[in-house]
Image (cartoon, rainbow, N blue to C red):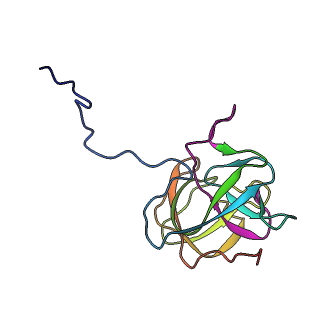
């Protein structure tokens, strides 16, 4: 009987995560909201006009959009209007930073786009960078105290 090999080679190191992917399960908590527009994975989201709706960016920070590999859209790596959005409110998540970030400094985001790592952006209470990264690279963001659910 011949056995088929499923995996014949192994990388020495694990690859980095992807935008919106969990970086660890440390103190992890999440909510489900509804997308009111396009929201890229790993972007900051805020409450919009509807009770359970969120938008990329905004001023009422709710959390960070979690990667969902089950979505099938013509544009990959994002939620589209009407999709259920996994929103990380506490824990560690990989994000693609807009500008260079330094580990152990406060996290900020761009309220216009929702992209994290904006040096002159809006500070997120209780959030900081676990890793350093150059602009356009992946970094681990920790939401330490949990985002406040502004819908209740």
- Residue 52: x and y in percent read 77, 64
Which quadrant of the view contains residue 55? bottom right
Which quadrant of the view contains residue 32? bottom right
Which quadrant of the view contains residue 54? bottom right
At x 49%, y 72%, the residue is 104
Which region of the structure is painted magenta? 55-77
- Residue 8: x and y in percent read 22, 29
Q: Residue furthest top?
A: 2
- Residue 47: x and y in percent read 78, 66
35 relative position to 125: left or right: right
Q: Residue furthest front?
A: 1
Compare residues 115 and 47 and report the one nearer the observer: 47
Q: Residue furthest right?
A: 49
Residue 37: in magenta span: no
Dominant secondary structure, magenta? loop
Point out the image quarter for the N terminus.
top left
Residue 116 seen: no
At x 80%, y 49%, the residue is 37
Point out the image quarter for the C terminus.
bottom right
Count of residue discs:
0
Compare residues 12 and 101 and report the one nearer the observer: 12
Residue 62: in magenta span: yes
At x 23%, y 32%, the residue is 9
- Residue 118: x and y in percent read 67, 60
130 relative position to 30: left or right: left
Image vertical order of residue 67 relative to residue 147, above or below = above
């Amino acid at each position: 009987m011949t056995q088929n090999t499923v995996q014949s080679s192994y990388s020495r190191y694990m690859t980095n995560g992807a935008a919106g992917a969990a970086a660890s399960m440390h103190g992890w908590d999440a909510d489900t909201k509804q997308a009111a527009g396009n929201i890229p994975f790993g972007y900051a989201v805020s409450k919009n006009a509807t009770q359970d709706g969120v938008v990329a960016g905004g001023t009422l920070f709710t959390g960070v959009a979690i990667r969902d590999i089950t979505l099938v859209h013509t544009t990959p790596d994002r939620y589209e209007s009407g999709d259920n959005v996994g929103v990380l409110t506490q824990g560690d998540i990989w994000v693609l930073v807009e500008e260079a970030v330094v580990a152990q400094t406060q996290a900020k985001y761009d309220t216009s786009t929702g992209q994290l790592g904006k040096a002159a952006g809006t500070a997120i209470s209780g959030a900081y960078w676990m890793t350093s990264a150059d602009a356009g690279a992946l970094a681990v963001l920790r939401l330490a105290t949990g985002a406040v659910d502004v819908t209740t």
